Image (spheres, rainbow, N blue to C red):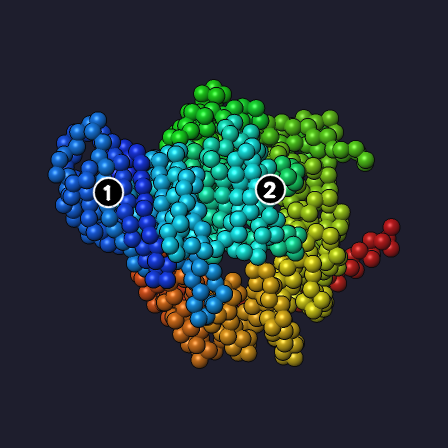
Amino acid sequence: MSNFYFDTENNGHRSFELPGAKPHYNPDRPGQVEHIFLDLSLDIPNQSYSGSCSIRLSPIRNGIDSLTLDAVNLNIQSVQVDEVEQKFDYDGEKLVIKLATPTEVGKRLLIAIAYSVEKPQRGIYFIQPDKHYPNKPTQVWTQGEDEDSRFWFPCFDYPGQLSTSEIRVRVPKHLIAISNGELIETKDDDKYKIYHWSQQEIHPTYLMTLAIGDFAEIRDEWQGKPVTYYVEKGREADAKRSMGKTPRMIEFLSEKYGYKYAFPKYAQVCVDDFIFGGMENTSTTLLTDRCLIDERAALDNRNTESLVVHELAHQWFGDLLVIKHWSHAWIKEGMASYSEVMWTEKEYGSQEAAYYRLLEARSYISEDSGRYRRPMVTHVYREAIELYDRHIYEKGSCVYHMIRAELGEELFWSAIHTFVQDNAHKTVETVDLLRAIEKATGRNLAFLFDQYVYRGGHPDFKVAYSWDGDANLAKVTVTQTQAKNNQSKELFDLKIPIGFGYSEAGTSPQIKTFTVRVNEREQSFYFPLETKPQFISFDVGNNYLKTVTLEYPIPELKAQLEFDPDPLSRIYAAEALAKKGGLEATKALSAALKNDGFWGVRVEVAKQLAEIKLDQAFDGLVVGLEDKSPYVRRAVVDALAKTKTAESYKAIKGLVQDGDRSYYVESAACRAIGAIASANLDEKPREEKVLKLLKSVLEERQGWNEVVRSGAIAGLAELKTSEAALNLLLEYTKPGVPQALRLATIRALGKISVGQNPVNLERILERLGELAKESFFLTQVAVVIALGQMETPKAIGILRSLADQTPDGRVRRYADEEITRVQGNIGTENALRNLREELDQVKQQNQELRSRLENLEAKSKSSAS
């Protein structure tokens, strides 16, 4: 599964376990489910269906006299076992079948349940046009992970049971139905068509799927197996652009994992209103239709490519090897996320892959520092869906990379092959991965798992360096700042390579590497070297998941930024230089923004230049608006939004008016111009000009996924005291506004609320209260994000009622977290805001003085020499 589109940010080391969390275990198994057969007939206009679910069960024990199945809000009409009617109890959540004849080992039962469903809340979703969205397609699709299959058919709904399955479904003739496995028959029946799919490889209930719509089918293949893409008609070119690399990816992963793709076909179905980025149903992945990219988006949108390889990787990690319990989900999600890194390495090279890993690490680190810290493996939660966070995706990916670094290339792949081959078509837990590593390599990596998997956190390193010229000794002091003292259970014990770099002009740098054991709160290491090194590389290769702060002198940082072959080391050097500030650092960063060969480093350098509060930083930055990489131009625009001067306003205004080849750069410019205008509120005319400009963007630039217009909405939200901006935003929250734009606007209401007068604040709360009643998952998430940014106790009431009423565990969790956040906002906010505004003014005056001073110093140096 990919969580991709939804981010919520929070602050403070909170506990992952919210009130009501408890240990969860798989239930006792009465027997082995061998086969599940659904035979359904759909009534799409009435959002309902009826049919039967047949389950073949082979008992494990004698004398069981009742069976308990998961079944939520289903109308159960009758239950038969071996064609004999049985008594049953049903409370709306559990179906308890009283067996007339108790079980006998070796004697299979065929359970047949006749049932119907009206207007289901979860599990199966009916998408149809309505008066607000007359062009919406008619579709039906399912989403089982984590425990939602029980909402659309009765089952033993946990991942520990694997069985074969088949689905026969009757749909209106003009629609097609896609499901797991192979299509074994289609039949015409008056106005209807019957599709019969059969999945012969065993898999869990959460991976059973059905997708129905008037799709265009695009056929591809890999080694004779069909590879198909289903999209709304008219989007065929986007489908090929978005998913066309799939056969090459299947080839790549089959080879990497040491196991050929195991299923009879691979289909990808793009559906409307999907509630995740994608879902890896066995042989039939569902994807959000928002992942389809047009030609212009392909410039700088690799998210889709990553999403496609992520869900494909799950066909091995997740579908072929199934987790036995949700607490081990990192095994599949971590590998799917790591496969994004592996594919990036194959397609775009090792620097790109390293940068991708850094972004994954940061994504986890921001959750760890801002939302909660938790062990990656835990069975204590309120609902299993809470586990689907950045700890299992991004941190999971980083852990797989550390295993690879620890074992080396050959042994790592040998361990992965062993893991996959030994556990194909079985369930796995974390310990099975450790066992496979030991079996294939003889290495025991329990020490790594104990530090990174079974407990929360990661090391925060502070690294200082000095050179003793008399003794020719380099001294490196490493502090683990996350630990309180030397006995701390927060200490990490790792073997870390430290490199000393020497570079001659025109040749690639030579690095002399020593590996040291870092296991105390503070340690100093001494290295005898023939000559003074130009730069120091801590954790050569940057394989460990960590944060790192470099305390080196400026000359060493400049040399590292220029010469270190590892892009992550260059980025750490850029961060350290920006902290030093001053003209010399500004010049070094400006040079890197022009000259570094890798766009990822240039992106980070642009961010760091914005941190230096000198006017000269602007001169270095503005050059980057001409960078050939759209990623860099976007980062430069974001950085200029922070510098908030008349010059940055001029530079950005041109971009908003004339546009950019990249949607994302254009969108960032629209947001930035709002941010800059909001800083100079003594100039009312400027705010009016910006309003007019953004309004024209909203009127004229609808387009792909509403990226550009959403940027204009974000720009308006920056004008926090403007009633005119608020009035515009409220217009765009109405039903009928394209969904992506409407969601962006709902989120923006939170941002603009903090500067509005009490009357307007009431208008915002009233609107969010109405929106909170809508049932669509993404609308609810947008409302929660908006309320979480507010500074009024009234936001808490709406969040509470949303948490109580939503059927979605993710929304419930977000709402609970945002309540805490609003409580924090209310207490200290007003006093803090006044202080912040005063501080900003002082900083601005300070910047002007320092910039003049740096200039004078530079002049006096040049005249002295």
Binning the other alpha carbons within 10 Å of mark 2 as few (below 14), some (14 to 19) or many (20 upward) gives: few
Residue 282 location (% of width, % of height): 43, 40
Q: Which residue is mark 1?
A: 112
Q: CA distance from mark 2 to mark 1?
A: 42 Å
- Local secondary structure at mark 1: strand
Which is more toward the observer, 809 or 564?
Answer: 809
Residue 488 location (% of width, % of height): 42, 37
- Local secondary structure at mark 2: loop
The mark total stands at: 2
Q: Which residue lies at the image location 12% right of the left edge and 38% below the top edge?
A: 100
Q: Is residue 252 left or right of residue 763?
A: right
Is residue 215 among what the camera can see?
Answer: yes
Q: Which residue is mark 2?
A: 245
Binning the other alpha carbons within 10 Å of mark 1 as few (below 14), some (14 to 19) or many (20 upward) gives: many
- Position of residue 716 relative to residue 612, above or below, is below
Which image quadrant is residue 118 in? bottom left
- Amino acid type of the residue that numbered disc 2 sits on in the rendered structure: Lys
Q: Which residue lies at the image location 14% right of the left edge and 37% below the top edge?
A: 65
Q: Which residue lies at the image location 53% right of the left edge and 40% below the top edge?
A: 227
Is residue 778 among what the camera can see?
Answer: no
Residue 21 location (% of width, % of height): 30, 48
